[in-house]
């Protein structure tokens, strides 16, 4: 068993608005990540997945609980955001070089070649497609030699074939630079194609409702295997009353 | 051509021909008076421009980032924005004397509030996603400011610089006219006493050429370079 590198224990994350009441988004989120393990958190849109990733990525410190990194005082975190978030005034290659140490030119160039971005290395983000921009953002996350890669719906709003290509690119990057990964997605296919373990999120506030360990023979075993396993995961997905308990309670009250 | 014909037709010393103005410009340049006065005025423009841009940018950035700074300074900026240039110039001369510092401060104070307002708007419009990306990849404050913030502020800074240059050189002439004993503004005032429109136009046009040259040689190429990523 690989050593645990991260313990997440988010007891409560609350959103406060000036006027309205406070809204508890996340509750009792407890899970660990082992070294080089890829975990997928699957939940419906708006359930707080991105919020959780922001807590782990140290972009938001306002929560009750504790996130503990083992072995690393200041872990290198490579984030792949929902939007590519490339700087439009820097070329693709310059975007990668900006976030990496000066001795990383070779790593950057190797990743650009591996992810099919080499011909576009001197293009500005406005001159390339969204699919390519996402690839560049994946390359950027891996270029910093991360201790963990956080992926926030990296293939959302891509058509199925582009998303498939994106997943392949991600797996290529992972093969070249094996590291720990935490993927949040609403798409079971992403989870089935990329993860070792799937945590299903549901409820309000959002909690972990089930855990599925993908059998070693099914892990990253190609498109067909991913589609087949996604189908199995679909059967395990929490049904509506669990996903939206408040809504179902309200409607049963009305009855 | 039109000017030349119109001047010939008018035949008045109050409306000199283009050739006469050009000749005067050459004579003044040869005598050294034009160049020395141009240099003095340009130095004042440069000093006031630098002070207004640096302080205005810092102030606008702080107001855009911190709400409290904005609340504390907003009314003052509005007052300065609406204060007539002449009032500021007279007050500066009265309070600090007819000296170079008062002249430059008066010009800079006229431009500073509009720079601050433009940069404040630019700072408010900063893309938080990009700032967060920089934070996530631990770029550090200096690198984030240089590579993430500054390029986003560039269009606002260029707009401020363009309008700044246009406003400042006009105000510098008034400042020179009111309280300095050299510079293009002083020369124009002297020739105004003599009703010598030829000299007034010669000095004015010479200065317009210089300001236009700054725009063509410096500002436009720099702006093209900075915004070459735009399709």
Image: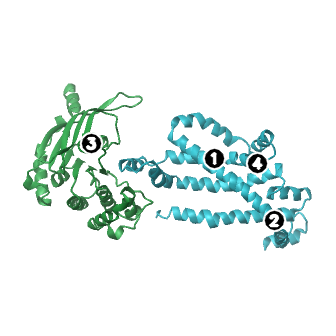
Disc 1: CA contacts within 10 A as few (<14), some (14-19) or many (>=20): many
Chain letter of mark 4 equals: B
| Residue under label 1 | B114
Which picture quadrant has residue B188? Answer: bottom right
Residue occupied by mark 3 = A49
Q: Residue at x 36, y 51 (%)?
A: B137
Query: Chain B colour?
Result: cyan
Q: What distance separates the C-alpha of mark 1 from that of mark 3?
A: 43 Å
User: Which dot marks residue B34?
Assistant: 2
Query: Label 3 lies in what chain?
Result: A
Depicted A178 relative to depicted A202: above or below: below
Q: How is the image coloured?
A: by chain
Q: Is residue A229 left or right of residue B66?
A: left
Task: Locate residue B187, reporting x and y percent.
Answer: 84, 58
Q: Viewed as shown, does residue B164 lie left or right of A165? A: right
Q: Earlier in the sequence, mark 1 or mark 4?
A: 4
Q: Residues within 10 Å of mark 4 (few under 14, many from 20)?
A: many
Asked if the residue under mark 2 is in contact with the one under mark 1, i.e. CB atoms within 8 Å, the reply is no
Q: Is residue A201 something that shows in the picture?
A: yes
- Residue B103, disc: 4
B90 lies above or below A101: above
B54, above or below B2, in the image: above
* Label 1 vs 2, first from the N-terminus: 2
Question: Mark 3 vs mark 4: same chain?
Answer: no
């Amino acid at each position: 068993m690989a050593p645990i590198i991260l313990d997440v224990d988010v007891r409560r994350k609350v959103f406060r608005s000036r006027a309205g009441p406070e809204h508890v988004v996340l509750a009792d989120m407890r899970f660990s990540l082992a070294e080089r393990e890829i975990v997928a958190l699957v939940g419906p849109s708006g359930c707080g997945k991105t919020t959780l990733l922001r807590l782990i990525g140290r972009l938001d410190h306002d929560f009750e609980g504790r996130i503990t990194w083992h072995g690393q005082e200041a872990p290198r975190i490579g984030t792949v955001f929902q939007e590519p978030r490339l700087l439009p005034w820097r070329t693709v290659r310059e975007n990668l070089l900006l976030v990496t140490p000066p001795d990383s030119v070779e790593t950057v160039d190797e990743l650009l070649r591996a992810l099919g971005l080499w011909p576009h290395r001197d293009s500005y983000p406005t001159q390339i497609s969204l699919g390519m921009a996402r690839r560049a953002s994946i390359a950027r996350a891996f270029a910093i030699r991360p201790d963990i890669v956080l992926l926030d719906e990296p293939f959302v709003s891509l058509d199925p074939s582009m998303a498939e290509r994106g997943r392949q690119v991600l797996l290529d990057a992972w093969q070249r630079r094996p590291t720990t990964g935490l993927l949040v997605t609403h798409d079971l296919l992403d989870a089935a194609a990329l993860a070792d373990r799937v945590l299903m999120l549901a409820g309000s506030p959002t909690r972990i409702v089930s855990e599925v360990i993908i059998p070693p023979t099914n892990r990253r075993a190609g498109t067909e295997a991913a589609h087949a396993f996604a189908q199995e995961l679909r059967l395990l997905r929490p049904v509506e009353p669990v996903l939206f308990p408040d809504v179902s309670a309200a409607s049963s009250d009305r009855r | 051509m039109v000017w030349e014909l119109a001047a010939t037709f008018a035949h008045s010393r109050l409306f000199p021909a283009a050739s006469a103005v050009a000749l005067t410009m050459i004579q003044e340049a040869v005598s050294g008076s034009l160049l020395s006065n141009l240099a003095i005025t340009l130095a004042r423009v440069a000093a006031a421009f630098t002070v207004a841009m640096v302080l205005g940018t810092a102030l606008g950035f702080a107001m855009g980032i911190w709400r409290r700074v904005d609340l504390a300074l907003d009314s003052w900026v509005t007052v300065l924005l609406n204060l007539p240039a002449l009032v500021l110039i007279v007050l500066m001369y009265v309070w600090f004397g007819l000296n170079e510092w008062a002249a430059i401060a008066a010009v800079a104070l006229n431009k500073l509030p509009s720079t601050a307002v433009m940069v404040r708007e630019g700072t408010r419009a900063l893309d938080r996603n990009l700032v967060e990306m920089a934070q996530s990849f631990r770029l550090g404050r200096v690198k984030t400011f240089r590579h993430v913030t500054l390029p986003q502020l560039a269009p606002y800074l260029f707009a401020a610089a363009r309008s700044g240059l246009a406003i400042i050189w006009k105000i510098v002439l008034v400042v020179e006219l009111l309280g300095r004993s050299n510079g293009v503004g002083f020369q124009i005032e002297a020739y105004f006493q003599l009703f010598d429109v030829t000299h007034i136009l010669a000095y004015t046009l010479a200065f317009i050429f210089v300001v236009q040259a700054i725009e063509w040689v410096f500002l436009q190429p720099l702006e093209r370079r900075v915004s070459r990523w735009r399709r």
